[in-house]
Amino acid sequence: MKFKKIISLITIFSLAIAIFAGCGTKSTSTDDNGEDNEKRIIIGFSQLGSESGWRTAETNSIKNIPNLDSNVDLKFSDGQQKQENQIKAIRSFIAQKVDLIVLDPVVETGWDSVLQEAKEEKIPVLIVDRNVKVADESLYTAFLGSDMEEEGKKAAKLIIDKFGKDANLNIVELQGTAGAGATVGRQKGFNETVKDCPNYKITKSQTGEFTRAKGKQVMGDFMKSDGDKINVLWSHNDDMAVGAVQAIEEAGKKPGKDIFIVSVDGIKDMFQLMADGKSNGIVECNPLLGPQILEIAKSIAAGKSVDKNIKSKESVFTQDQAKKELPNRKY
Ligand code: AHR
C-alpha cells in the first residue's frame, strides 16, 4: 500500500515537471509527425556589392548568421552597385514571404516605393550600414550602422590634432560612391569640422568609388597636377587610401611623411600600412554586423519592439597604436 502511494506520488511529480517544462517552449510549433519545432526565421539580405575589404567583412559576418543560430536561414543577393538590382531582390524576398528583409543600400534615396510594398505585405525591413532617406520613416523597422557624419568629424579632428586649427593645409579628398550615405555623411561631417580652420583648403575632391584601383588612379592624377603642394589626403575609405599610397610612392613621395593620410574603416591592410609609417590615422567603421542583426531578427520575430536607430561601436586609431592593434584586427 505504502509502495503504491510512493509510485503515484512520483507519477504526479513527473507530470507536473513535464507541464512546467512545456510552458517554457513558447516559440515551438508542432509538425505533421506531432514533433515540436522552433519557428524558423528566414532573412532576405540585399547586399549592395563587393567593392572593398570592409564590404567583404560585412558580407561574411552576415552570411555567418545561420551558423550562429541553426533556426535562421539566410537568402543572399548581391546588387553589384546597382539600385535596380537591389530593388529586384527586395521584390523577390517579398514574393518569397521572408520574415525579415535586411537592406544595405547602395545610395540614400529612391527606396520609398519598394519599402512601401514590403510594408503592405507586413514584412519588416532592417536597414544596415548606410542609411536611407525616405519621406516616411515608418517604411522601415530600424537602422543598424555607423554614424557616417560622426566619422567625417573624427577624421577632421585627427588632422586638427596633428596640425592645429591655424595651419596652412592643402587637402585632397577621395570621395566614396556618389549619393551613398557613407559618402554624403562623411563629407558633411568633415567639411563642417574644418569650417573653423581658416587656412585648410580642399584643393581637389573626386570619387574613387570606394575601390583600391580607382583610389590609386585618382590619387595618381592628383599627384601629377598638384603633387608638390599636397599636405593631406582625406580618403572616405581604407581601400582607396591603400591604392593612393601606391600612387604617392610611384610619384616619388613618402606617404605618411610627405603627405599625412587619414581614412575610414580599419581593415588589416590599412593597419599594416600605418604600422609601417605610411599612413597616419584611421577612423573605425565596424562591418561585423551579423551578431547584432541576429539579435534584432529574433526580437522582431518574437514581436518585441526594437530601437529605431542602433549604432555600432567604433574607435579612432593613430599611427602609434597601429602595431599594437594589428594582431587584434578581425577584418
Ligand atoms: O558603407 C560603408 C562603406 O562602404 C565603407 O567605408 C567602405 O569601405 C565601403 O565600401
Image: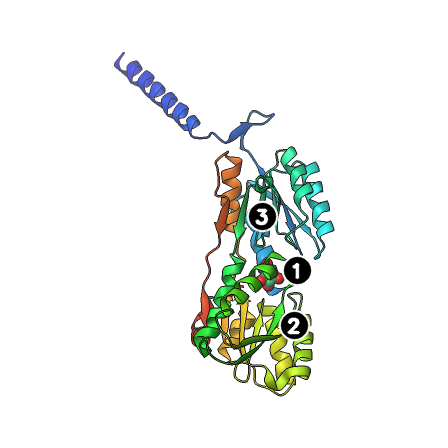
Q: Which mark, residue 225?
A: none
Rendered location of residue 73, percent (x, y): 60, 43
Q: Which residue is drawn at 66% across and 79% down?
A: 222
Q: Which of marks 2 and 1 is nearer the N terminus?
A: 1
Q: Look at the image and name its color scheme.
A: rainbow
Above or below 38: residue 281:
below
Q: Earlier in the sequence, mark 3 or mark 2?
A: 3
Q: Is residue 326 visible from the viewing direction of this image?
A: no
Label 3 – label 2 distance at C-alpha: 27 Å
Camera-nearest residue between 231 and 292: 231
Q: What element carries label 3?
A: strand
Q: How crowded is mark 1: few (under 14 residues within 10 Å), some or many (20 or more)?
A: some
Relative horizontal placement of residue 15, taking residue 223 as reference (left or right): left
Please state which amino acid type lies under the numbered disc 1: Ser
Q: Earlier in the sequence, mark 3 or mark 1?
A: 1
State yes or no: discs 3 and 2 in contact (Cβ < 8 Å): no
Label 3 – label 1 distance at C-alpha: 17 Å
Q: Which mark, residue 215?
A: 2
Above or below 105: residue 238:
below
Rendering quadrant holding ligand 1: bottom right
Look at mark 1 in the image and give the residue it sits on. Answer: 50
Please state which amino acid type lies under the numbered disc 2: Gly
Rendered location of residue 127, percent (x, y): 58, 48
Above or below 267: residue 7:
above
Q: Is mark 1 on a helix, strand or loop?
A: loop
Camera-nearest residue between 10 and 83: 83
**Between tags 2 and 1, which lies in front?**
2
Q: Which mark, residue 127?
A: 3
The quadrant in which residue 129 appears is: bottom right
Rendered location of residue 61, percent (x, y): 56, 54
